[in-house]
Amino acid sequence: MGKSLKIILSILAALILLLIVIISALFIFIDPNDFKPEIQAAVKDRIGRELTLEGDLNLSIFPWLGISTGKMTLSNAEGFQTKPFAEIQESDINVKLLPLLSKEIEVDRIVLKGLTVNLAKNKQGVNNWHDLIGTKPEPSPAPGSVTQEARPTEKAQTLLSIGGITLENAFIDWDNQKSGKHLEIKDVNLGTDKIVFDEPFAVDLALTIVNAQAKLTESIKLTADLTVNEKLDNFQLTGVNLQSTTAGEKVPGKSLKSALTAANVLLNMAKQDLKISTLRVESGDLKIAADITGTRIKDQPSFQGPVAVEQFNPVLVMKQLEITPPVMRDANALTRLAMNFNLQATDDAANLQDLLIKLDDTTINGSASVDNFSQPAIAFNLTADALDADRYLTPEKEADKNSKPIASPAVTTAAAASLLPVETLRKLNANGELTLHEMKINNLNMQDIHLKLSAKNGIVTTQQSVNQFYQGNYSGNMNMDVRNKLPVLAVNEKISHVQVEPLLKDYKGEAKMSGVVNMSAQLQAQGNNKDEIKSSLNGQLNFLFKDSVILGFNLQKIIDNSKALIKGAPLPADSKNDQTLFSEMTGTATINNGVLSNNDLVAYSSKLRVNGKGSANLNTDALNYKIKATLLKSPDADGQQAEKMTVAVNFGGTLSKPSYTVDPSSLLTEENKAKIEEKKQKLLDKLDKKLGPGTSDLLKRIF
């Protein structure tokens, strides 16, 4: 037995020695450079490209079967630039010889130095690599031939391992002539650990992307552990760490750093599935976390998963991005923002469900979506608990607090819309609803607010309502047509049972009037700014005040003071509690090119009847108004109503600072009417006596 084993071992040793001698002889007597023409012809026949082998081919035999090359060039596709598609300065690849006998392919480290790839797409959208990845159709079976049924093949037992891949100083040029974009990816350096299918190996990648058109440079570094299956259709990345630095003249601070990490990334190309776990993106003060699942990523990509934006300071982020933050009334406004939502997205749409936004002290819930990124269609349905909008407005000047005009929600919305560029409004495609439980704006407090927005094809429409507005309610709508050069506005609104005094106190800090008001308005205007809108304003309004009190203005006292002044009597002392009471005050007004005219003001009280008419110029703020107040005297001792007395009062000045004067002629006429009639009759009687009977009748007919 021992002798037989020695014989077998001797034979095997002799065979191995013979194999080594034969391989060595081949290595000595056969020059691989002699086969360059055959290699180049084979490439030409297979892919239709020219392969140029400029450097020498060097073989190694044992224990590694390998080849190293000098410069190699592969020509470009037909119809593209003359510069080569790919070029390699040096390459080196070795395969261990003995494991091949047991169907094991063990490759030493693959090294590629000075790789240059020129990728291009022409104006017709055809790229210069389509012919390299195309597959030839299977030949059809000959007529009458017997087709054997396909049998399941046994699982391939060949094992492949690569000692690693090194890519040094590679360069990729991307020229998209169809879109006009041109990118250079340079300084590409790739290093990996030993690569074995279905086992993780470390990957270290660094590259720089240069966008000369945008004058941007982005440096990227990636480290991760990668697992690949034998079919190269299933990839897993763990411990992903991607660091990016973007630099350029237009980049805030000339440089912006960001980082992306992920615990696990699974990509199954066969099933077209993607799963990213514990994704985290950071840039400055901004931090975003997500878990994303993707389906049909090649055919119809769809992504979904929870996304959380950690609380950050928007003002600080704007400063980091070199964006000047707006000056606001509250220095602490816009300093806290956090967001959570469930993302549903495709390559052309995004839908945010279960949206939760916390902005400073305001919480917003709902949903929002954007469809068709190239021409966005926006939809939203949001609900907020409480919003103090005044915190975000520009600081109010002390001098303007008491002179600011009251603007209704519809007018405010129209004014805000007019500040936007017309082209933006023309392109706006939005439809949504916003509900606020409480809101304060311009110091006005509102509860249960609803806003509907619809914008499409140059027509912007809003509907707004306030169900609790100073013990009353408000409703209105605004329509803006921006299809033509000059935008056209239309506003309709109505307030019912609103308490005037608390409204004025909140808005202006003081109230010179109280009571309950009902009012409606229909207004139209056109223009690109506030002044144009004012000067073209047209429409009508009507109002009804009930149980109103005008503070600091006592109409009866004004009349009494004027009479005392005429008579030379002492004036009564001024009082800070002067007021005029009306049980009801009604009227209508028309507006023509910014001038408001009212001709039917009527007011009632127990002692006064007032009729008035006049105008207010909204362009210049000038006021020109006249009222006739009929003062009713109290019954005398016998219970008889005293004679009525009508007095005219002229109002001038401005809407913010009105002034008034009493018409003296109206006072003289009413005060002395009886005396003048008495004196006139005595004079006529004297004329009859002197000139004869009938003279007074003649004078009466003449005068």
Image (tube, rainbow, N blue to C red):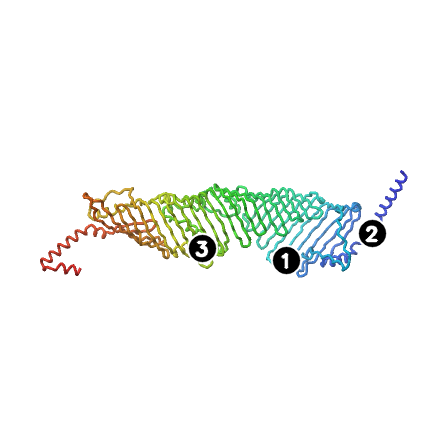
Disc 1 vs disc 3: which is toward the camera? 3
Q: Position of residue 267 (x, y in %)?
A: 65, 46
Residue 119 percent location from the top left of the image: 65, 55
Query: Which numbered disc flags the more N-terminal residue, 3 or 2?
Result: 2
Q: Secondary structure at mark 2?
A: helix
451 relative to 74 in the view: left or right: left
Q: Which mark is residue 26?
A: 2
**Disc 1 residue type?**
Lys
Q: CA distance from mark 1 to mark 3?
A: 44 Å
Q: Amino acid at mark 2?
A: Leu
Nearer-the-camera pick, 64 or 553: 553
Q: Which mark is residue 121?
A: 1
Instruction: Say left or right for 395 vs 27.
Output: left
Residue 387 appears at what percent x and percent y? 45, 43
Q: Quadrant of residue 701?
A: bottom left
Q: CA distance from mark 1 to mark 2?
A: 45 Å
Total labels: the figure holds 3
Which picture quadrant has residue 552? Answer: top left
In this rendered view, identify the residue nearer to me: 283 or 9: 9
Q: Which residue is mark 3?
A: 480
